Amino acid sequence: MEKQVWSIKESLKWGIQWLKERRIENPQANAELIMGKILNRDRLNLYLTFNDFLSPLQINKFQKSIKKRARGIPLSYIIKESYFMGLKFQVDFDVYIPRPETELLVEKALDIIDSLKSREDTLTLVDLGTGCGNIAISLAKNLKKIKIYGIDISSRALTIAKKNVRLHQVEKQVELLLGDIFSPLKKFNLKGEIDGIISNPPYVSSHQISFLPREVKKEPMIALDGGENGLEFFKRIIPESSRYLKRGGFLIMEIGYNQEDEVGRLILSQKNMGFPRIIPDYQGNPRVAIAIKK
Ligand SMILES: C[S@@+](CC[C@H](N)C(=O)[O-])C[C@H]1O[C@@H](n2cnc3c(N)ncnc32)[C@H](O)[C@@H]1O
């Protein structure tokens, strides 16, 4: 781009071509979302103002961002936002990017609450490994009377989660706690008091990490690495959950596509947990494990 004056349309054309040549999927959507972020306009407004000129600063920002995207930096890290359950969340390099697949976990948690209790009940829930807070916040938005503890071992992730809690005005419902799995809950004396535990823990096996796509490897390792066979967190979460849940309380977790047998066995090994249910995602892969405390 040597010319000094560029319209939105010309810049987009350049950006789309740059991404296309570097085999980035959906180059048009990527370029438009990046442009929209820089100009603070939605995609419809971009089309309506296609012939507006960009300032040199805007051109520079756009080019830099397109080049970052071409190097495999995830779009969400460039535009610093991501959508989950129809809500907008701030994200950056310090947090895992919410995935559409994880919406199934939240939908199933809401289904369990509908079948066992009521959305109007006062419930105490826990979101283990809350990241940017997407699960805890979307539950709080759907269940006005819950109290949910969002726990994460990464203080950087919690800094972002805090911003999202404020953005969605759920400060009264979501309490963020720093620490290792259940440890920050100790001071609250909640054993046997929790209505539901929800978690999308790190579950990629350590030896698979190096085979992950280049974009996924840009996310925090602590959010991905689930130790040997990716099962380390399930081995810790399942027995502890059985102690923290009330009778009739539920544990619901996202699992990897080949982990249903092992996770099922871990649940069955807890005498006070009911028979595990495994739910497939829309591609038919096992995705969510559920168990109710007896
Ligand atoms: C796969 S991400 C899930 C993020 C978010 N809940 C979601 O589903 O989009 C897993 C999260 O667990 C956190 N984590 C990793 N080890 C942890 C531990 N020992 N205790 C608490 N959280 C942990 C990571 O920092 C990361 O935010």
Image: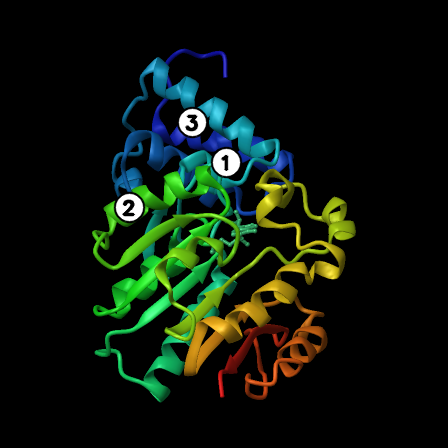
Q: CA distance from mark 3 to mark 1?
A: 26 Å
Q: Amino acid at mark 1?
A: Phe
Q: Position of residue 134 (x, y in %)?
A: 39, 55
Q: Residue 234 lies in what quarter of the image? A: bottom right
Q: CA distance from mark 2 to mark 1?
A: 28 Å
Q: Secondary structure at mark 2?
A: helix
Q: Position of residue 75 (x, y in %)?
A: 49, 40
Residue 252 visible in rendering: no
* Circle 3 residue: 11
Which mark is first along the chain, 2 or 3?
3
Instruction: Give the number of the mark in front: 2 or 1.
Output: 1
Residue 184 visible in rendering: yes
Of residues 175 and 256, the one nearer the viewer is 175
Q: Residue 136 lies in what quarter of the image? A: bottom left
Which mark is first along the chain, 1 or 2?
2
Q: Secondary structure at mark 3?
A: helix
Q: Is residue 9 above or below residue 253?
A: above
Q: Amino acid at mark 2?
A: Leu
User: From the viewer's perspective, is 269 left or right of 196?
Assistant: right
The answer to the question of whether label 3 and label 1 lie on touching residues, with beta carbons closer than 8 A, is no
Q: Secondary structure at mark 1?
A: loop
Seen at 42% across and 42% down, the residue is 91
Q: Residue 135 lies in what quarter of the image? A: bottom left
- Residue positioned most to the right: 207
Q: Is residue 288 above or below residue 153?
A: below
Seen at 50% across and 56% down, the residue is 99
**Which mark, by number, is residue 93?**
1
**Which mark, by number, is residue 44?**
2
